[in-house]
């Protein structure tokens, strides 16, 4: 679990990093070259695309940071965890749950994100 914790820390730190070069360095250790990221706001295929996607989030929400709000649950090659975005004034404009996949080399190969604390009512 230590290596998974390191990967998830680097991934989370990448979401908080405003510098593209440092963000790319963090994702090199955490994200597969051809990893797939999807959430309701967009899609990123590959590390460079994810670097750009995160940069656009920073443009939209200056000073925001991402915090985990749960532990990491996992089985086989899948993980899930909850998170929230916190703005400098302490407000939380969005929160969600991510479902991911870990590759054979221990890096993330896929994150599918859902916004909201729970699924909508049927």
Image (cartoon, rainbow, N blue to C red):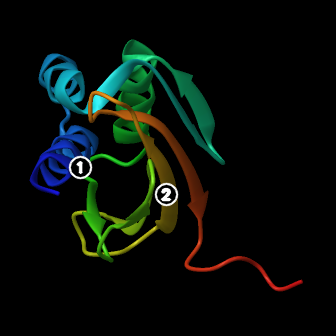
Q: Position of residue 47 (x, y in %)?
A: 37, 18
Q: Quadrant of the C terminus?
A: bottom right
**Residue 73 x %, y %:** 38, 69
Query: Quarter-wise, where is residue 51 in the image?
Result: top left
- Quick one: which residue is furthest to the bottom in this view? 121
Label 1 packing within 10 angstroms: few (<14), some (14-19), many (20+): some
* 106 relative to 119 in the view: left or right: left
Left or right: residue 82 compared with residue 112: left
Residue 104 at x, y = what percent?
35, 30
Looking at the image, residue 71 sits to the left or right of residue 3; the answer is right
Task: Look at the numbered disc 2 and give the secondary structure of its residue.
Answer: strand
Compare residues 84 and 82 and report the one nearer the observer: 82
At 59% from the left edge and 63% from the top edge, which residue is drawn?
115
Name the residue: 23% across, 49% down. 8
Residue 98 has which mark? Answer: 2
Which residue, given by chain and number where applicable, does mark 1 sit on?
8
Residue 64: quadrant of the picture: bottom left
Q: Pick whichever, 13 or 93, lies toward us.
A: 13
- Eyeballing the image, is 24 above or below 110? above
Badge 2 crowding class, 10 Å Cα cut-off, few under 14, some 14 to 19, many 20 or more, is some
Mark sitting earlier along the chain (2/1): 1
């Amino acid at each position: 679990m230590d290596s998974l914790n390191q990967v998830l820390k680097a991934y989370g730190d990448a979401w908080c990093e405003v510098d593209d070069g440092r963000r790319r360095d963090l994702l090199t250790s955490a994200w597969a070259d051809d990893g797939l990221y999807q959430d309701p706001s967009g899609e990123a295929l590959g590390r460079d695309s994810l670097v750009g996607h995160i940069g656009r989030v920073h443009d939209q929400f200056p000073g925001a940071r991402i915090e985990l709000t749960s532990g990491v649950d996992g089985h086989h090659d899948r993980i899930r965890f909850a998170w929230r975005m916190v703005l400098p004034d302490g407000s939380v404009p969005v929160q969600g749950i991510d479902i991911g996949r870990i590759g054979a080399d221990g890096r993330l190969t896929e994150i599918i994100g859902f916004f909201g604390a729970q699924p909508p009512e049927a």
